[in-house]
Amino acid sequence: MEFAYTDKVEGLRGQIQDFMDAHIVPKIQDWRREVHAGIYPVSFMEELKTTARQQGLWNLFLPGLKAEEPGTPLTNLEYAPLAEIMGRISWASEAFNCSAPDTGNMELLHMFATAEQYDEWLAPLLNGEIRSAFAMTEPDTASSDAANIQTRIERDGDDYVINGRKWWITNAAHPNCQLLIVMGKTDPNADTYHQQSMVLVPMNTPGVKVVRNLTVVNHHHPEGHCEIVFDHVRVPASHLLGEEGSGFALAQARLGPGRIHHCMRSIGAAELALALMTARAQERKTFGRYLHEHGSVAEWISRSRIEIEQARLLILKTAWLIDEKGAKAARKEISMIKALVPMLHTTVLDRAMQAFGAMGVSPDTPLADHWTWGRALRYADGPDEVHHRAVARMEVKESGDYLSLLDAYLTPYEPD
Ligand SMILES: Cc1cc2nc3c(=O)[nH]c(=O)nc-3n(C[C@H](O)[C@H](O)[C@H](O)COP(=O)(O)OP(=O)(O)OC[C@H]3O[C@@H](n4cnc5c(N)ncnc54)[C@H](O)[C@@H]3O)c2cc1C
């Protein structure tokens, strides 16, 4: 395993950093002002996208990108440090056409779309002309377990008819969101892992009703995390993605590399928090000392640095494993980083907020927004506990001949 950044990656990191400094950071206030005024998408996003694309900083997340497709194909290992830089500002990745959930949806369509589905949905997504959402979670079922999903997708002649209620559907309030990838049951009598399928539902199909955009810890996100009702939504049978009954397998395929992206953006947010905390601790004094001269604050800085480095290395290892052996072989590491990083994200952000005093919970720093998103990531793409469960199950399975291990090491103490 070799995780040192290659010259190519160093060059791209420099390019992304320069882009952030020149085009994104100067727009932070404008973004806030416009979103608070209800202007969304913000007026300058299309210009940012055009500039990023002209510089080759486009669709960097898709290793399988073909020569004729727009963008720069990179391995997961190459992309990870770039996602980290984008993650310092919550809305930056859209400028590079690298934002979730479109990235996961594009990965899925890249693997499974028919030629017709490619032209209608994947081509405009790759061009950044439209956006999309992924609709799996339901208010009425414990959706950590995908086998529970109840939305019905029933075959009716040449169509499928969809009935159900979803919530937390990210992006569904984005005015450019034109596609929903919907997971639901096509055959409740099949075995557990073959009951579900995915269908492509145009956002403007009659019967699709966005009920509300849920706030996240009372934070409004303009792209939306929406509750959506599907009331007799009818789409042609050709809108099925993959095979009937393959929804579970598609969901697994979709979430592999996507988790790397979330985790690397979290590392970016944690790095920003650490940098701000360290700067603030050198500027403010209490009881005759700078904050960093107080032992507890020094320890927050030290622990944050140590934990960020550990997490980044595990993410890079996971990215490397996916590149070398595929997402299936890396599934333990994928669950490990997904269980680890959102908690690290909120922990480092929380320390930085504390170091800023009351300003830490104000809107005058990016810390509260980043903390909120870190907290949400402890559920998105599966809650921490589900990933710990997966890691523990694999660990138990791999533990081999544990009885002879116990025999060898557990020697009963026999007093003389
Ligand atoms: C901001 C945000 C964006 C999201 N975006 C999307 C999206 O775009 N599309 C989408 O479909 N969903 C999305 N989600 C939903 C997310 O994927 C689900 O919330 C998650 O899968 C958990 O499902 P649930 O909320 O139904 O929790 P439940 O399944 O009801 O679980 C509740 C709790 O039970 C515990 N638990 C569950 N299983 C275990 C276990 N095996 N062992 C121990 N404890 C366990 C966990 O603590 C869990 O939090 C988003 C969520 C948020 C907060």
Image (tube, grey):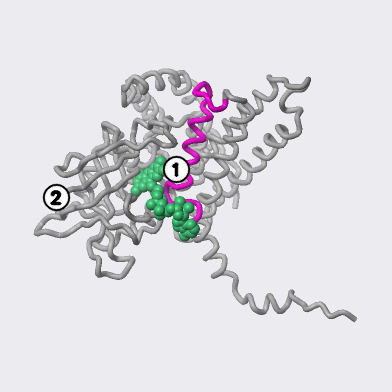
First in sequence, mark 1 or 2: give its number.
1
Answer left or right for 117 relative to 226. Answer: left
Asked if one can make out residue 357 in the rendered structure from this viewpoint, the answer is yes
Residue under the point 50% across and 44% down: 263
Answer left or right for 305 relative to 186. Answer: right
Q: What x and y, as percent, mark residue 77?
A: 51, 46
Answer whether labels 1 and 2 touch (C-beta < 8 Å): no
The type of residue carrying mark 2 is: Arg
Task: Compare residues 325 and 209 and report the one nearer the observer.
Answer: 209
Give the residues drawn in magenta, as a range. 360-386
Q: What x and y, as percent, mark residue 174?
A: 30, 33
Q: Distance between the residues labelled 1 and 2?
A: 38 Å
The total of numbered circles placed on residues is 2
Quadrant location of the C terminus? bottom right
Answer left or right for 308 relative to 408. Answer: left
Q: Name the residue under label 2.
A: 234
Residue under the point 68% across and 75% down: 405
Graded by Cα atoms within 10 Å as few (under 14), some (14 to 19) or many (20 or more), the crowding at tag 2 reads many
Q: What x and y, as percent, mark residue 369?
A: 48, 31
Q: Is residue 104 above or below residue 54?
A: below
Task: Compare residues 99 and 12 and report the one nearer the observer.
Answer: 99
The type of residue carrying mark 1 is: Leu
Q: Name the residue under label 1.
A: 74
